[in-house]
Structures are given as structure tokens and as C-alpha cells.
Image (cartoon, rainbow, N blue to C red):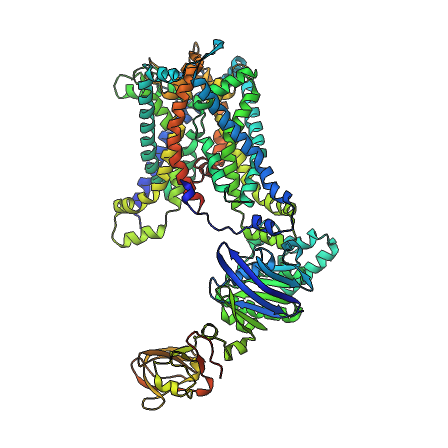
Amino acid sequence: MAFFELQGVEKHFGPVRAITGIDLAVEKGEFVVFVGPSGCGKSTLLRMIAGLETIDVGRFQLDGRDITRMPSAKRDLAMVFQSYALYPHMSVFDNMSFALKLAGVGLDTIRQKVERAAQILNLGPYLQRTPRELSGGQRQRVAIGRAIVRAPKVFLFDEPLSNLDAALRGQTRVEIHNLHRQLGATTIYVTHDQVEAMTLADRVVVLRDGAVEQVGAPLALYDQPANQFVAQFIGQPSMNILPAGALPVLSALCGGRLPRDGALGVRPEGVRIVPAGLGQVQATVSLVEALGADTLIYVDAAGTSLVARQSERTTLRRGDAVGIELNPAVLHLFNHDGRVVTA
Amino acid sequence: MHPRWMLALRTVAAWFFTLLLFFPLGWLALTAFKTELQAIEVPPHWLFTPTLENFVEVQRRSDVLLFAQNSLITSVVSTVLGLMIAAPAAYSMAFFRTRHTRDLLMWMLSTKMMPAVGALVPVYVLAQTAGLLDSLTALIIVFTLSNLPIMVWMLYSSLRDIPGEILEAARMDGATLWTECRHVVMPLALGGLASTGLLCLVLSWNEAFWSLNLSSARSGTLATMIASYSSPEGLFWAKLSAASLVAIAPIVAFGWFSQKQLVQGLTFGAVK
Amino acid sequence: MHKTLTPTPLPLMREKEQAADAGPRSVRLLPRILLAPAVLSLLVWMLVPLVMTIYFSLVRYNLMQPGEREFIGLDNIAYFVSDPDFGPAVAHTLQLLCAVIAITVVGGVALALLVNDPFPGRGIVRVLLISPFFVMPTANALLWKHMMMNPIYGVLAQVWQWFGATPVDWLTDHPLFSVIVMVSWQWLPFACLIFITSLQSLDREQLEAARMDGANALQRFRYLTLPHLGRSIAVVVMIEMIFLLSVFAEIFTTTGGGPGNESTNVAFLIFKQALMNFDVGVASAGALFAVVLANIAAAFLIRLIGKNLDK
């Protein structure tokens, strides 16, 4: 029995099945990220774990106990909300010590724990301030501190970085990563940003329309997506998807394994731009994005579009004729229903 | 960009119309400190030595203090009573919402929309039968019931303004319903409670319909006392002004502070 | 009515949680207990007078002869409606309503526009502007009756004289108009405050975009500001309709409904029947009439509020 286990968990809103039959086992100390497009149910699932939404079907076991019906207050979980949900009328210290106070912990112990958490999060000088006097980043750290102080069984994060500006987001991401290494706490983290998923997770759960598409380590998902949805969701820019009939010459590369109504997938870094006349297919450049470290070249070939990624700079411009070469080792083959072709 | 002369024009126009609108009140305030002879002077004096003789005389003649006391008692008690009834109801509707909550709220508001005159006869007859005519009790009951819908509505609004996630955070922190209420909801709802109370205080103090019809010498409020100056004998303008000033000054001051709540409460939130 | 509107999903699902909880039935009982005092009080406040009014309107009941209670069916209503004062009362009620609403809406919008944008002393202006609304109706009435409208010593009389005209005896010659002035003076600040609040939510960027599109001030007002105000104008009209139906204190304190019946409205007529003629039966019939009138206005207002509650 895993430390944390969801068995056949479902959520119904009237006739609508928002969450359908989810099974998930999480080990102690794992950092699991729920990721998916808007409306896929990741936040709902998190709230069901937290106890803020009911689990209509299925079971939820934590540390050997069935807590499917237990109220949030008793589950020993801590949640960091997207809007931080700090108590506006309490100081930072009171915010962080509220749960301990309710549990009847002694004042000295409380002070000790809060100060230790404040130290980890660099909140020491702000303990007597109210949330109104703090910046967004500071408030977020208080929200995290509030969770740390309780030393709960599982940490739940609900899109904690979405309200931060880009620079702060990157910085805080690294901080969360370090925090996890330091504390080793089991964490469930929800985000729509696949970069956060790739960088923070031990394992990623990709969700769509209330169901799990794939679970695995970030790079495993990147290299071996189970279906077209995961293939296109993970990785930026998205994987190039070419319907089988679009560029027949490319399909031949797969040695006839590609179904006639299927699709071929290749990541931008698997597409090489070669001089016109060379390569497998001829194309025209439609757009060049020079990002500095990478260059993205968008091309049109026989009615299909592709993106190529290379680390060298280019002098190509819109309208130039080029050739495309695909690396056969990194091709993904998909059935008509999106699932990967098993060799 | 607006040219400066437009700003000047607007300023002048705004001040002009405002002073025009405010003039009667201002004139009242001035007259309260004049002697009766000065009060009826034609043309009037703008400069004069203020005197307090009117206030003294009004107290002597019509016992302003009794009426003021009645106004105070009826306003305060009805407001407190109303809050005690309205607060739990608002809490229930805000945090234990059901399918019917909205309909219930609408129904409550609709009871406020019925003209007072529609209930005049039954209430009068009931008060008479119960021996409550000219009593503070009758006024308090009627004031409380009249303002109850507004109180429920305003408290409900201010409770709904509390972000739901904060309450969820409290639950995650281990709070029971009571702890959540005591440590999170109440501190955050205090502002709304105060402003609701203030508004209802103002409404009860100014209430004239029931006061005029249900009360007399014993339980009369300031509103009825003023009405008695309708056609007394002799010179009385300065005294009327003094009496009126006493009656309206505190409430006008309160009203200034409760502007926003006024909009919320009296439009039933239909205007944001 | 409002039942056709769908409720919005809520962040707090307490009642659903409690259904799933091992929690006892007492937890579901709690909300009902909390609601009980308010619901019961208002139920009593609404039903008891209504039932009594209906009963009284069907009997002959005079407060001077409390023993006699004879069932006379619709006679009271017939009597109320055939009272020679009835027609004028209804007419005056409608005149009062229309005049005050027109004055307060037009004046309110104008003033609100004037003070919406900053200018020196705006804070004080706003405070002065809303003051008349907080004056109690009786003080309001007498303020105007004696200080302003008295044909010899009143301020208006003196202004008239200053222009060389004969002062007008407002309350005698134009009683209804005088009442209209008093009530408008009181409610203008209210309307103004509502419109100021509404104007503050008008998107500035929208106005700037219109200006760049070449719209002048009048066009911006007509196509952007006025529609935005439309909703609050509707609210003001309806609120005033509901509260102005019951104008009473001003009439009671100044004209007493007269001279004759020239400033009597429906509310005062009912009062006259009840507490001057002591004819409870007829007064109750009249009250029913007033309630029906108010219900119509309220129905519209409820629909408007209901829509807003869903936001």
C-alpha cells in the first residue's frame, strides 16, 4: 500500500462526470505534479484530496487510513492556495501559527516552529506585518510558511505561481524545488504550466477532461508520450504532428509502421533545416524566431507547417527555400485515435 | 484634456448648485442662533450675535430631552434587536446556501417594499388592543421589523464579500465551524456590522410615519415633536430652527459617514 | 419570474460536504435555526397585517363603535372608490410620483455629472449635497413651510420681493406643488448619490476611446454615459416609486391634505379614513388598493435585483 492512494475516485456535478475513475499511488516524499489544460479537473482533484470537495465514488487512503469521508480539518494536509488566502486581519506570525494555536500547541513550541519556518523562507523581518503590507511574493511565502509550520503529511499547492510576474515565478520555482529537497515532504502540485511540471516533479500526472492521460517522470513523458495529447502538451514549442497522408515521403521513413490514417510526430529539435535541394522534403520558410540561445524556424511544406529548432544562428528569411531532414530515431507514430503505435 | 476654464466653470457651477440645495439647511442652522425678532426680519441679517436662548426655551417648553431620549432609545434598541435577529439569518444564507436562498432573500426584501400605510390600520388596531399605543415598545417593534429586511440584506452582502478561500484555508488549518466563525468571520464582518447598524440607526431616527401615528405625548420621538410646531402661536421660527437643529444634526453627521452603506442598503444592492 | 434564472456555482459547498460527512442531522438543522427568527418575524409582519386588512375591508368597523362588526362584503371598497376624494387622491399620488421622479432623476444625473470629476472642494460639496436626505421628514416639511414658503417672512417671499414681484402663498395656492418641492428636495440627494456611485464604475478607457473616435461630449454622454446610467436610473425610479407612494409626514405636517383635498394622496386618504373618520373598514379597503399598486412596482424591482444577485 502506497503512502497516498486514490482508488477509482470520481466526482459528479449532477449528470456531468467532472472527474472519472482516477487511480494514483504516491510514495512518501514524492513531488507529484498535476498538469493539464484549463477545465481538465486538476484543481477539482486537488480540492477533493484536500476535502474541500466531496469524493463521490472511490476511496482515498493516506498513511494507512481511509480518509475519503473525513472533513478537511482532520486530514492533516496543508494547502497553499492560488490567491494565498491569508487572513487579512492577522499578522504574518498569527497567520502562520493559527493552525497550531487551534491544535492547542504551547506558545513556546509555536514560536519556535514559526521562527524556523520564517528563517527558511526569509520572512524573519516581516513577522509582525499584516498581509496588506506585503508584496505578492512575500504573501506567497507566508502562504507556504503557513503550510510548512504544520509539518503535515502532504503539501498541496494550487497553482501557486500564477499570480506572480515572470521573473519572480522563475525564482520562486527554484525556491520551491530547494524547499522540497530540504524538507522531503510529500507534495501534490497543480499547475497549467508544463515548464513547472518538468522542472519540479518527480512524477507528472497529465490530466484531460477529468481523466488521467499519462503518469510518469518528466523526461519519460517527454521521450515516450503515450498519446498525441501528452506529446503535444509537454514540450515547447509543441511537437510537430504530420498526418500520414500529408507528406508521404516522410511516412516511408517509418518503415511502413505508420497507419494510413495515423500521424507522425517529431519534436522541433528533431527537424533539421538543410540547404534547398537536400533533405527529405522541400519547404519554404514562413517565420524565423531568433531567441538568442535557440532559433526557431517555421516552414511550410506541401500544405503542412513544421517548426524546427536549432542552437545555431541563421541568416534565413521568410520566403527562402530550404530542405527538411527528420531524424528517424526520434519519430513518434500515432494511431487515428491518438494513441502511440506499439511496435 | 480639458482646458482650465472648463474646470473653473465646473467648479463654480458645482458649488453654486450645491449651495443652492444646501441653503435651506444652512439657513436653518443660522436661524437657530438668532432671536425670534431677528429670525423674522425682512430683509434678514446675515451678521448677528449668536444666542443659545432658543435651545433653552425649546427644552423648557417642549422638553426636548424627553423626545430626544425616546428617539435615542427607539433607534438604538430597534437597531440592536434587528442586528441580533438579522445576523444569524445573514450568516446562514451566506455560508449555508441552498437552492432556495435567493428566493428567500428576495421575499425578505419584498416585505420592505410594501407601503407602510398598508399596515397602518392593523398595526394601530393591534397596538390599541394590546394597550401599546403611545408606547416605546410598539415603536421599537415596528422599527425593528421595518428595517429587518435591509439589515439581513446588508449583512448578507458583507459576509459574501469575505473571500471563500480564506474560510477554506481556515478549515484546512483545522478550524471547526465555531472557530472559523469566531476567529475569521467575525473580525472580518465587523465593518459590515457597524455600517449596517449605523444605517438603521439613521432610518429609525428619521422615521416619521409610525411615530406620528402610534405615539403621542409619552413616547413621541423628535420627529413628532417637530411636527407639533406646525402651527403654534406667537413667534417661533428661531425655536423651531433650534429644535430642528437638535433633531437633525446628529443624523446628518451620521449620514455623512454612512453614505456608501446607504447606497447599498436602500437600493438593495442593485447599484454597484 | 426570477426562477428562470440559473444560480451561479459557489466556492463554498458546505451543504454538500455536510451531506457527505458522518455529521449528524443537527448540522443541517443549524442553518434553519439561524434563519428562524428572521423568517418568522417577517412572516408575521407580512401576513398578520395583510389578513387583518382583508378582514377589515370586508366588515363595517368603526373605531368609535368597536363592538359592531358586520360583514358587508365589497361595500367598503365601493365606498372608498366612490369617495369624491378618491379620484383626486389617486391623481395627486401619480402627479407627486411623476414630478418628484422627473425632478430627482434629471437633477440627480445633472448634479452627478457635475461633481463626478475632481475639482477643488469636491469632498465638501459631496457632503453638503447629500445632507437634505438625512433630514427627518417632519423637520423638512416645517423648514419649507415656515422658513422658505411663508408668504411674508419666508426666504422665497423675500427673493420674490427683491425682484419686485408679489410673493406667492405656496401652501395655500399651490399645495401639491409645495409638497412636491419638499419631497424632491429630500430625494434629490439620494438620486444624486446613486448616480455618482454608478458613474464611478463607468470605464474611463471607454470614454477615451470614444474621444479618439471623434465623439464630442454630447455624443459621449448619449451613447456611453446614459446607457451605463440606465440601470441605476431604473433602480432610482423604482425605489422612489415604492417609497413615494407612502408620502405622508410632509402632508400631515403642512397642508393636512388641503386646502380641501388639493394635496391629499392615497396614503393620506387612508389615514384620514382610519384615524380621522375612524372608519377602519373603508381605510382597509383603501390600504389593499395601495398595496396592489405597490406590488406592481415591487415586482419590477425584484426582477432587477434578482438579476443583480446572480452576478
Asked if residue B63 can be seen in this view, the reply is no
Residue for point 47% across, 87% down: A329
Corner quadrant of residue B189: top right
As drawn, A317 above or below C243: below
Instruction: Please state which of residues C80 and A258 is positioned toward the viewer in this rendering.
Output: A258
Quarter occupied by the N terminus of chain C = top left
Query: x and y percent of residue C185 in the render?
Result: 37, 28
Residue at position x 74%, y 54% in the image: A106
- B170 and A331: which is toward the camera: A331
Q: Indicate whether B237 appears above or below A22.
A: above
Image x and y of residue A107, in percent? 73, 53
Residue at horizontal 48 percent and vertical 57 percent from the top: A16
Q: Nearer the viewer, residue A135 or A16?
A: A16
Picture coordinates of residue A84, whole percent (x, y): 56, 57
Q: Is residue A226 left or right of residue A249?
A: right
Judge left or right: residue B159 versus residue C187: right
Residue A248, horizontal then vertical, whole percent? 35, 84
Q: Nearer the viewer, residue C217 or C261?
A: C261
Q: Image quadrant of residue A294? A: bottom left
Q: Is residue C64 visible?
A: yes
